[in-house]
Amino acid sequence: MNFIQAILMGIVQGLSEFLPISSSAHLVFTSNFYKVFKGIEIVQTSNEEVFFDIMVHLGTLIAVLIFFRKDVINIIKAMWHALKTKDWSDNEAKLGLFIILGTIVTIALALPINEIAEKLVYTPSVVGILLFVTGFTLLYSEYKSKKIEEKKSELDLKTSIFIGLAQGLAALPGFSRSGWTIATGLFCGLDRVTAARYSFLLSIPIILGASMVYPLIKIDIHEAMLYNWEAILAGTIVSAVVGYICIKYFMKFISKFSLAIFGYYCIIAGLATAIFFSVYG
């Protein structure tokens, strides 16, 4: 892991984590494009690269927490009040419960397919195909959403479960987490802003959990001391800054425009990368 590569991947993570274009796919593509042009075998990887991937995700988590800090504080306060009064009628308190439920559903689905997801990192051509599927899903969700006359601005139990399942499925690189969760929200009748807000809030427990659990169970302290920490920290900071800017403007974008442009991008990028890595992988 060198400094330039870390900065580049930090930018890619910051942009692609919140845009519905699959950050995991773009990290796979960026890393493997770098290996192809450097003449390094794609099958080669390192614990440092995996750890760096966790760290840039932590950077985008920081971006979410800063941008949605008021929402997070309000949800925590509402849930604390509901616990004391046993009155869960407040919408923010219910949203907190839906986030917990969605996270449980996500883990239940993501854990069984995690081994498959880890292997896909070494087959970027397949990741490209999954990105193509994400693009089609985004376009179809917009088509279905237009047929729903009255959009919902609040979640319900069924919708939170479906979105949690979508987030679990997005453990597969190429299946965009934000793309699949927002698209599922649209399928269930949510308006775009509500779907995007819940998608971002739902990402907090998962990214936080992965950032805390992975280092505890897989990082060798002696090996970690040899990592290029300047590059890792630089990439993490860049992903946080770029991620915050991306959230800010994406929320404005999605309130006025459809996800179609991202759908077309995923279809084109997915096909292009699938073909490229089929030839050069």
Image (spheres, rainbow, N blue to C red):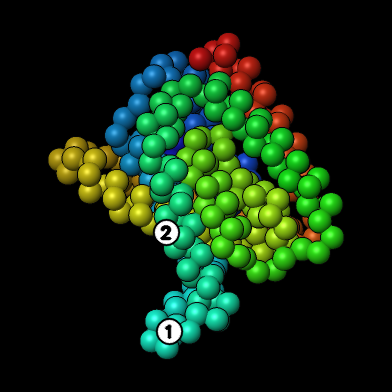
- The residue wearing badge 1 is 86
Q: Residue at x 56, y 63 (%)?
A: 157
Q: Amino acid at mark 1?
A: Lys
Question: Residue 268, relative to residue 192: is it above or below?
Answer: above
Give the CA separation, mark 1 to mark 2.
24 Å
- Few, some or many C-alpha atoms within 10 Å of disc 2 (few <14, some 14-19, many ≥20)? some
Q: Measured from the top left, where is residue 209 in percent x and y?
A: 35, 54
Q: Residue at x 65, y 59 (%)?
A: 195
- Of mark 1 and mark 2, the one earlier in the sequence is 1
- Is residue 15 in view from this perspective? no
Question: Residue 150, relative to residue 138: is it above or below?
Answer: below
Q: Measured from the top left, where is residue 16 in percent x and y?
A: 58, 45
- The residue wearing badge 2 is 205
Residue 148 or residue 74, whichever sits in front: 148
Query: What secondary structure is found at the residue carrying circle 1?
Result: loop
Give the mark toward the camera: 1 or 2.
Answer: 1
- Is residue 91 in view from this perspective? yes
Horizontal placement of 76 versus 136: left or right? left
Q: Amino acid at mark 2?
A: Pro
